Image (cartoon, rainbow, N blue to C red):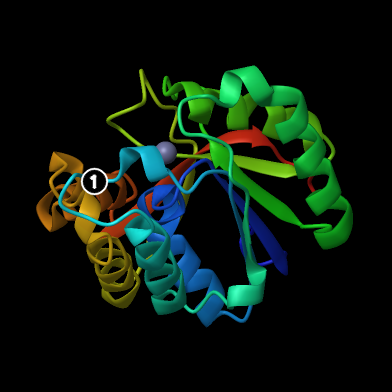
Amino acid sequence: MIFENINRVLILAPHPDDAEFGLGGTIAKLIEKGKEVFVIVFSLCEKSTPANFEIGAIEQEMYASLSLLKIPKENIIVFDFSVREFPARRQEILEQMIEVRNKIKPDLVFIPSSSDIHQDHAVIHEEGKRAFKFYNLLGYEMPWNNFGFTSFVYNPLDDSHLNSKLDAIACYKSQNFRTYSSPEFITALATLRGGQILIKYAESFELIRLIAK
Ligand SMILES: [Zn+2]
């Protein structure tokens, strides 16, 4: 199946923590199976640092979280586009994606879904489709940003995969005031998606492009 026949996976994350929320369990499972996982983070969101945290806190949390998921540091590519200002810099963002694409040549790319209404996520979705139009593309789920979500692809998760996702998200102490950061919320979504395919836990994805082999 799609997750078995691939070796190199690239995740386009507009901000730190998007990869973990969208597919933290899937990352844990892919790495367990020996796949190589790369992440591009387009902004370190310094403007979103809560008043009681130091600038740079989110970056440290991100490295802790991605290292907990066993993504090697050299596979994490970080850009410094300002948060919520991606729409004004879409061409530059596209060019950066193409440069990384030509170096990594991934077999599968995860991007924010087509129903994600956050302005930065929408830019990464649109430019991601342009940069990777000849690649397998899946959209990841963020219910608090999604106006409707077509969950056509399911990845079953073991308890250990969900626990890794929960532990990774818990690294973001500066962001844990958000309702959707709670373990209950994250577990409920995994339970819902698992229940749809009669198993305990899953993550689901929007099918954007699949090149059958
Ligand atoms: Zn985001």
Taking the spot 37% from the left edge, 38% from the top edge, the residue there is: 47
Taking the spot 12% from the left edge, 46% from the top edge, the residue there is: 177
Residue 196 % position (x, y): 30, 43
The reply to whether residue 72 is visible in this rendering is: yes
Taking the spot 43% from the left edge, 54% from the top edge, the residue there is: 23
Taking the spot 49% from the left edge, 79% from the top edge, the residue there is: 70
Image quarter for residue 129?
top right
The reply to whether residue 115 is visible in this rendering is: no
- Amino acid on which the number 1 mark rests in the picture: Leu
Left or right: residue 97 versus residue 50 is right
What residue did someone put label 1 on?
189
Nearer the observer, 190 or 213: 190
Name above or below for residue 203 compared with residue 14: below
Residue 135 % position (x, y): 79, 44
Disc 1 is placed on an element classified as helix
Nearer the observer, 141 or 17: 17
Left or right: residue 178 versus residue 117 is left
Residue 176 % position (x, y): 17, 52
Nearer the observer, 55 or 105: 55
Residue found at the very far right of the displayed protein: 102
Image quarter for residue 81?
top right
For the N terminus, the quadrant is bottom right
Nearer the observer, 67 or 59: 59
Residue 43 % position (x, y): 52, 44
Task: Decide: few, some or many residues near mark 1? Use Cα within 10 Å; few <14, some 14-19, many ≥20.
Answer: some
Left or right: residue 153 versus residue 195 is right
Q: Quadrant of ligand 1?
A: top left
Image quarter for residue 58?
bottom left
